[in-house]
Amino acid sequence: MAAAAPATDSKIQTTGRRKTAVATIKMIPGTGIIQVNGREANDYFTTTTSRIEAVKPFTIVESVKKFDVEAKAHGGGINGQAGALSLAISRALIKFNPEFRAVLKKGGFLKRDPRMKERKKSGQPGARKRFQFSKR
């Protein structure tokens, strides 16, 4: 039995992560309203680059004003949360229309960014930094 695509009135829920940031979204067909933690996306993301990155999957698949997104983001910083939101939106778009997968994959929107801060090791002041060596 083949799985059918979700109906247009259904709510799609996905999660995206980047570094230590996590974004959980609920996406429904609508007029293009994007809310993050109860605030409009343009108010929440203070820098232009993070605003653009968060909604870039919509521009790639040419569906900017077709969906409403309600997101909860926590952890990390603003840029990490924007990346997490971008991944969550990409995953939701694929659930809505599997044909978007090729375009989003080519653009690199389906890969989780695994880079994280390296932990501090014992016996040294940071992750890689060492205490000054004195021969005598």
Image: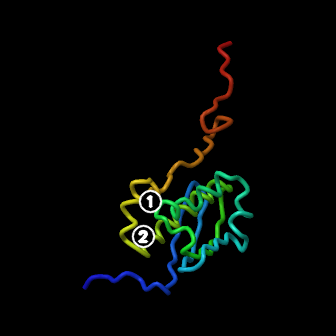
Quadrant of the image containing the C terminus:
top right
Assign a secondary structure to mark 1.
loop
7 sits left or right of 129 in the view: left
Q: Is residue 32 above or below residue 20?
A: below
How dense is the environment of label 2, judged by Cα within 10 Å: few (below 14), some, or many (20 and up)? some
The type of residue carrying mark 1 is: Leu
Task: Give the number of the disc on residue 94.
Answer: 2
User: How far apart, in angstroms, are the residues tagged by discs 2 and 1?
Assistant: 10 Å
Q: Are marks 2 and 1 in contact (CB under 8 Å)?
A: yes
Query: Residue 85: which quarter of the image?
Result: bottom right
Quadrant position of residue 43: bottom right
Give x and y (percent) for residue 66: 54, 74
Which label number is shown at residue 110? 1
Closer to viewer: mark 2 or mark 1: 2
Q: Residue at x 44, y 76 (%)?
A: 96
Nearer the observer, 130 or 33: 33
**Depth check: 133 or 24 in front?**
24
Q: Where is residue 87 in the image (x, y as percent from the top left)?
A: 51, 62
Amino acid type of the residue that numbered disc 2 sits on in the rendered structure: Ile
**Which comes before the other along the chain, label 2 or label 1?**
2
User: Which x, y percent locates residue 22?
Assistant: 59, 64
In the foreground, 120 or 45: 45
Label 1: few (<14), some (14–19) or many (≥20) C-alpha neighbours in 10 Å: many
